[in-house]
Amino acid sequence: MNFEFDDDQRMLRDQARRFLLDKSPPEIVRQTLEGDQPFDRDLWKQFGDMGWIGAAIPEEYGGSGMGHLELCVLAEELGRSLAPTPFASSVYLGAEALLTAGTEEQKQGYLPDLATGQAIWCLAISEGPQPATEKNTTVTVTNGKLSGAKIPVADGDIADRAIVVARDGSTAGLYIVDLNGDGVSREMVQTMDPTRSQAKLTFADAAAEKLGDEGWPLLERIQDRAAVLIAFEQVGGAQACLEMAKEYAMGRFAFGRPIAGYQAIKHRLADMYIQIELARSNSYYGAWALSTDAAELSVAAATARVSGNEAYHFAAKENIQIHGGMGFTWEFNCHLYYRRSRQLTMVLGTQRRWKDRLIRALERRNVA
């Protein structure tokens, strides 16, 4: 079984890397971090024009119809560049939810604007620091009217529509809510990584449209699909940390020789490489399961998620350490990757929760 990308996908990767090096260098990330704009609107528009946002959306719904493997390629490059856009919320979550559970009418109505970047979507699950479960969901929907609050919601401050997890009686389901409509208010939430903004969404009898009929199992399937794509972002970010650390170590001299020649630094770089390659291997496994809709997706997604979390956090931390006393300063870019690594670790649930999901998935597979 070949888990490597083909020639066309590698060409897409090279093109995306060149584009992002030119259009989304660290200076652009810093403008978002230090400015008052939550994301780079020009960059987002260019993503739409190039068909990146609609990469996995079929052409009949306005997408470019490339496929999920191509989307994985793009995700890795976006992770390398720290591109300050709502790509993950709109594409990994919004588009995947509509493709997985939307009716034909919903796909025709919503996907074309999403594919071009004219509409931004988000997924609202959490209701505070506790892990979100079907039992502790307090947002409710009655007769098509949704009430309650979600916090934090990634890109909730800029999204046009949200897919909200809410209870209808004793069961939880997914509902589409127009965030620009009546009964919706937003409040910015400060986080460690302002380049991926977060918000509190409060609903007061907001109009809600049902998405799918499976409730919580549907949400977990959508999370599995998004987890693979986020793992590729983490691999891309971790690889950028390794390259940054290596470049600094090769150019930083101590006692007349590059610090890269010292065993302690070699060991740190080697450990980073091992963690990243393990995460990359697991992400490739996830990409195969995602692109083929394999029965192993739940195992592959959780495995990619756990290893991606560990690799990115480790690489971002070691990158700072190798840079020494300069590594944690504002002038160096190390902290940009550390911020993003911590933000991505909390997306879709904590590391502990994904380890639990991996164990449960393996148990189910072994029983079968």
Image (tube, rainbow, N blue to C red):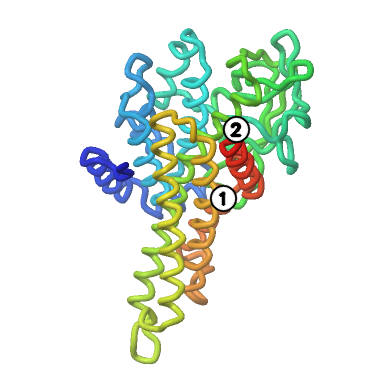
x%, y% of residue 204?
75, 19
At horizontal 53% and vertical 18% (from top left) the residue drawn is 101
Q: Is residue 354 above or below residue 272?
A: above
Q: Is residue 164 above or below residue 34?
A: above
Q: Nearer the viewer, residue 279 or 247?
A: 279
Q: Give the class, few, some or many, for how many residues have Cα within 10 Å of label 1's Cα (few <14, many ≥20).
A: some
Pinpoint residue 257: horizontal percent, then vertical percent.
Answer: 34, 87
- Name which residue lies at 65% across and 21% down: 215
Type of the residue with mark 1: Asp
Residue beneath the point at 66% across and 30% down: 186
Residue identified by numbered label 1: 193
User: Which of the two discs, 1 and 2, labels the residue nearer the N terminus?
Assistant: 2
Vertical side of 366 occupied by 249: above or below: below
Mark 1 lies on a secondary structure that is: loop
Q: Residue 161 falls in which quadrant of the image?
A: top right
Residue denoted by label 2 = 156
Task: Give me the disc on residue 101.
Answer: none
- Where the N terminus falls, by quadrant? top left
In the rendered structure, the answer to whether residue 304 lies left or right of residue 368 reads: left
